[in-house]
Image (cartoon, rainbow, N blue to C red):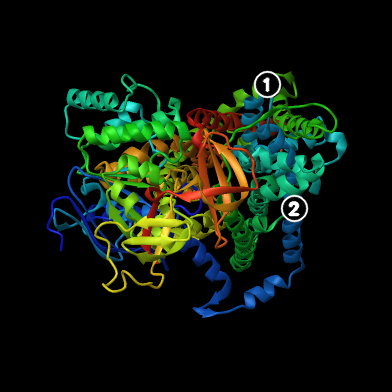
Amino acid sequence: MTRARGLGVHDLTVRYGPTTAARRVTFDLAEGEVLALVGPSGSGKSSLLRAVAGLEPAAEGAVRWDGQDLADVPVHRRGVGLLFQDGQLFPHRSVAGNVGYGLTGLSRRARASRVNELLDLVGLPGYGPRAVGTLSGGQAQRVALARSLAPEPRLLLLDEPLSALDRALRERLTGELHRILRVSGTTALYVTHDHDEAFTVGDRVAVLLDGHLAQVDTPAQLWRRPVSREVAAFLGYGPFLPAEIWDGLARTVLGDVPLPAGASTPPAGTATGRATSQLLVGLGPDALQLGGELAVPVLARRFVRGRTEMEVRLPDGQVATAVTRGAAEAAGQVRIRLDPGGAVVVPA
Amino acid sequence: MAVVTGRPLPDRTFFRGGAAALFWVVAAAVPLVFLGTFFAWPVLTLLARGVMTDGALDLSGFADVLSRDRTWRVIGMTLAQSAVGTAAAVVLGVPGAYVLYRCRFRGQGLVRAFVTVPFVLPTVVVGVAFRALLTDGGPLGFLGLDGTFTAVVLALVFFNYAVVVRTVGALWARLDPRLEQAARALGAGPVRAFVTVTLPALGPAIASAASVVFLFCATAFGVVMVLGGVDYGTVETEIWVQTTQFLDLRAAAVLSVVQVAVVTLALAAATASRRRQERALRLQTDSLVRQPLRLRPGADLLPAVVTAAVVLGLLVTPLAGLLVRSLRTPAGWSLDNYIALGTTGGANALTVTVWEATANSLRAAVDATVLAVVVGTLVALIASRRPRGRTAKRAVGLVDALFMLPLGVSAVTVGFGFLLTLDTPPLDLRTSPILVPIAQAVVAIPLVVRSVLPVLRAVDPRLRQAAATLGATPGRVLATVDGPFLVRALGLAVGFAFAVSLGEFGATSFLARPDRPTLPVVIFRLIGRPGAENYGMALAAAVVLATLTATVMGLAERLRTREATG
């Protein structure tokens, strides 16, 4: 049982009729922390979020705050803010009317000053009297964020808040969201399908795959040490090469990758001998560089963001991407080498 | 994850907490008790008359009534009038929907508003207007259409044109034009693109409109009474004749059963197609792309010509004719017919003056509107919830369907049922002036529900959830999220309820006491009496009634916003 301060989700299962959206999910969220919940679409992220908000009942398990079970606490008493993908601003209220909606029990003046404070925070000073219909998509999401933050929820839930925006705006607002959540000291659970966004916004990142929680870690740790092939693949690693352990190294056809410190080393005696293939090496986006020993056929090439990416066929038949800076000559074959820093070792 | 499209999310925030639960129980109880007492009980009692004798099931009444040639003639006439009327309304209404909702041109708003007027006009007024036009000596008397099947059907189309135009037009305006453009880009000509892409998309709306129109035609009373007479009597008028002329209550009850059966079928078809339409609509974007009207052959010329012909020939002519004829007296042009409204007619045709009847009508309409709006709004609130549980979901669906029934059961049946049931204590209302407003409210409730419900349904449940996460109690959510939408829809609902009450004739003709007739009752009585003076008064009174109704609807339309469209 969780005694810690903040949110405790314990063995939570969420069902929609016969389908199970989330299965026995357990994690904690300390006060002031931002946890990014990331996973492919349909992995159950939004269901989990709605269950924490109280919009879906928990089929099993518990949602707790400071150790207290929230099962019987209705949505409006949970002190949980929720930011939807498409804002859901009240169309019949002005910007200020929306932001001030959750500010009950304040004097008119106190409410106005809080509203202005929040509009400043989200970078829309002076927008209070505007009609909601006149806002652009990015502005509407900022207003929705201000509205959610206004009552100072003890926990803010963000459900893919930037997904409906175009890419450039999304990248800018991701950074801004990070700043706003820190400045306001908000405890937040941030759901997204985009791991870059999750890495930017989250203090820790939780990976949800097919309804179960695969890993919860800091962004750096998650990137360096994915616990399974599935997590690594979701983060963008691949293809995966079988590896043998040899002198503390994972040895593949392309080269050696050091085993991570503290990783479960194989039992003594096998360290010098041949082990069966119990490890996989996942190739990161920059793992294969041009200019090595191994010659491989090139299947396709493209020029992206100032570098050339080549699809090559590895000796075992898998297709991988090798990169080099600048535009490379077209060629039927290239020589590649493995950069150990760009690859990870995961259990087979 | 994108949750914008597809099945709406269940709305949990509304079915929690003791106070909220109590609110919903009361909200459900009020309309259930009202319609149970003033609709289900009278109608079921009436139906029981047809199939029960001394408390035992007895179908001999059916055998007897159904073996009469007269019965089959009446049923055949009802089906023929409804089928032809519906077909004509659809064939003429679809081009109208295109021109008035998919294209744009100057003065379109005005034409749209005008097209709606006939729908809310009292049936008696429409009957009188067509009669004035087609009668011997009338402007179109040479056509020899007075008292013919064609005249009745024309009047039915006059009434229901707006139903088709508005139902189909509302969907058409929102149909993504890129779908048809895609078909054109794939090589389909305009006709093929329309038939293979647009028409199937409009199908549910057309089917829905057609079944509603069929329903209105099959239960039309005032128009048939005034224009059809005995030869073109329908089930609805026959119930009235059997009750009031032949005093054969059993035959009337059997006919009511027949009518309920026909109407239930039509209503079931309407509900099914509406459901399909609502499902389909969620997939459409709300792109209000309207192109300018192109008056070239091969472009919009044909629909434009059809629509202009219908609007001018079928809609404007009878109304203009009515106005003109009301200013004609044997002595020439004058306002005498209007001045005579302060009298009780030639040879004392009436028990009260027409102005007194007008006051009666207005008073009854105010009461009926209050009743209908209170009950109808509660029904719409319940039907717009999306609870989680399967039982609760079914219950909501049932409420929705149940309260549409008065739309289908004829007003004559309701009025007749009132006479049978509300004559014993504790509910002895026969002599009470509230009887007429109650019956009118029963007739108006489905229209109130239909104007409020789509607006409430359009409220994204996540708006309510957003409010709840901001700390709003269920009561505050209702007041601050649903409330503003409700208020905008209410303008239209009040207008509909008031207009329907003002013009209600079927039930009122049974229930209005001789010393307190309403305006439609008086008009019908006047045209039934001999004498040019009485006829002239009927025309003038019809103009007054039409003006009142149109004014009320005009005011309601001004309160209406885009959310309330469709």
- Seen at 65% across and 36% down, the residue is B118
Visible residue check, residue B366: yes
SS for callout 1: loop
Q: Nearer the N terminus, badge 2 or badge 1?
A: 2
* Of residues A214 and B103, the one drawn nearer to the viewer in this rendering: A214
Q: Residue at x 63, y 25 (%)?
A: B110
Q: Position of residue B358 (x, y in %)?
A: 52, 33
Residue B363 as seen in the image, left or right of residue B244:
left
Identify which residue, A161 or A225, lies in the foreground.
A225
Left/right placement of residue A102 relative to residue A44 reads left
The chain ID associated with circle 1 is: B
Residue that appears at 63% across and 78% down: B60
**Element under label 2?**
helix
User: Residue B116's x, y, as percent?
Assistant: 62, 35
Please name the amino acid that badge 1 sits on: Arg
Q: Quadrant of the C terminus of chain B?
A: top right
Counting other residues with Cα less than 10 Å from the Cα at mark 2, is it few (<14), some (14-19), or many (20 or more)?
many
Amino acid at dot 2: Gln
Residue B105: x percent and y percent?
A: 69, 24
Residue B522 or residue A82, whichever sits in front: A82
Task: Identify the subunit bearing mark 2.
Answer: B
Quadrant in which residue B37 is drawn: bottom left
How many residues crowd mark 1 within 10 Å: few (<14), some (14–19), many (20+)?
few
**In this figure, which residue is indicated by the disc labeled 1?**
B106
Check contact, mark 2 vs mark 1: CB within 8 A.
Answer: no
- Residue at image x 44%, y 56%? A255
| Residue A210 in sight here | no
The answer to which of A299 and B56 lies nearer the viewer is A299
Residue A66 position (above or below residue B362) = below
Foreground: disc 2 or disc 1: 1
Q: Which residue is mark 2?
A: B81
